[in-house]
Amino acid sequence: MADDEPAARRGVRQLLAPFADFTVVGECRDGRETLLALDALQPDVVFLDVQMPEIDGFEVIRRRTPERMPAIVFLTAYDEFAIRAFEAEALDYLLKPVSEARFAATIERLTRRLTSHTPRIAVTTPRGTSVFHLHEIDWIEAADNYARLWCGGRSYLLRQSLADLERRVSPHGFARAHRKALVRLAGVKALQTETDGELTAVLSCGARVRVSRRRRSEFTAAVLSGATGS
């Protein structure tokens, strides 16, 4: 969430508390912090104040571009910006103070949006920013404080923990193979038992990812469920 007023950020946390599917991954006090956090945290939703120091909410969208923004919910004390908000493709426009009923209606709209759209992941590279649809990602591995996305034999570093990524991608066909790896189930070509008895997921891209003994049954069931379309 992005708001220069601590009380407003606290209010959003309180309103979100009953909705277990939503977690606050970051708070920002101005537009500059917001732009940095959007790159670092890759949230699915941003609650965005219109008027913030230096860079306002609309300028955040302009600099990042609407295509690279998550779902936007404007949260402001001013009603005169509503038309601009929807021109900026905002999902909703909430006026402070927000009632619980009005906020719940917004959460319902967000839930419909997020469950009907597969998220994309933006990665900063030396040449700019690349945006990947989840079906382009073969597997993801932990790399210290980063995650490494493997896409068609090439890898990209993302400054986000594997645990945070798991929350984003697991509803869209990814599963843990071991403590440091997430695999896109639709990309698993075969499950192979090695001579030492360990299980390996052989991916369509050619990569081979070991499956830990602890996750073997769960991972195998997830692959088979995907293969049979159940």
Image (cartoon, rainbow, N blue to C red):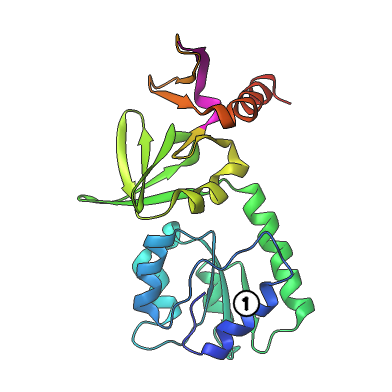
Q: Is residue 226 visible?
A: yes
Q: Is residue 137 visible?
A: no
Q: In the image, is residue 134 above or below residue 96?
A: above
Which element carries disc 1, helix, strand or loop?
A: helix
At label 1, counting other C-alpha atoms closer than 10 Å, the crowd grade (few under 14, some 14-19, many 20 or more) is some
Look at 59% across and 36% down and name the residue there: 173
Along the line of sight, the residue nearer the viewer: 159 or 124 = 159
Along the line of sight, the residue nearer the viewer: 62 or 111 = 111
The residue range painted magenta reads: 184-194
Q: In the image, is residue 67 above or below residue 228?
A: below
Task: Specify whether 197 is left or right of 105.
Answer: left
Residue 90 placement (x, y as % from top left): 56, 68
Look at 57% across and 45% down and name the residue there: 118
Which quarter shows the C terminus?
Answer: top right
Residue where numbered disc 1 is placed:
13
Is 73 part of what is drawn in magenta?
A: no
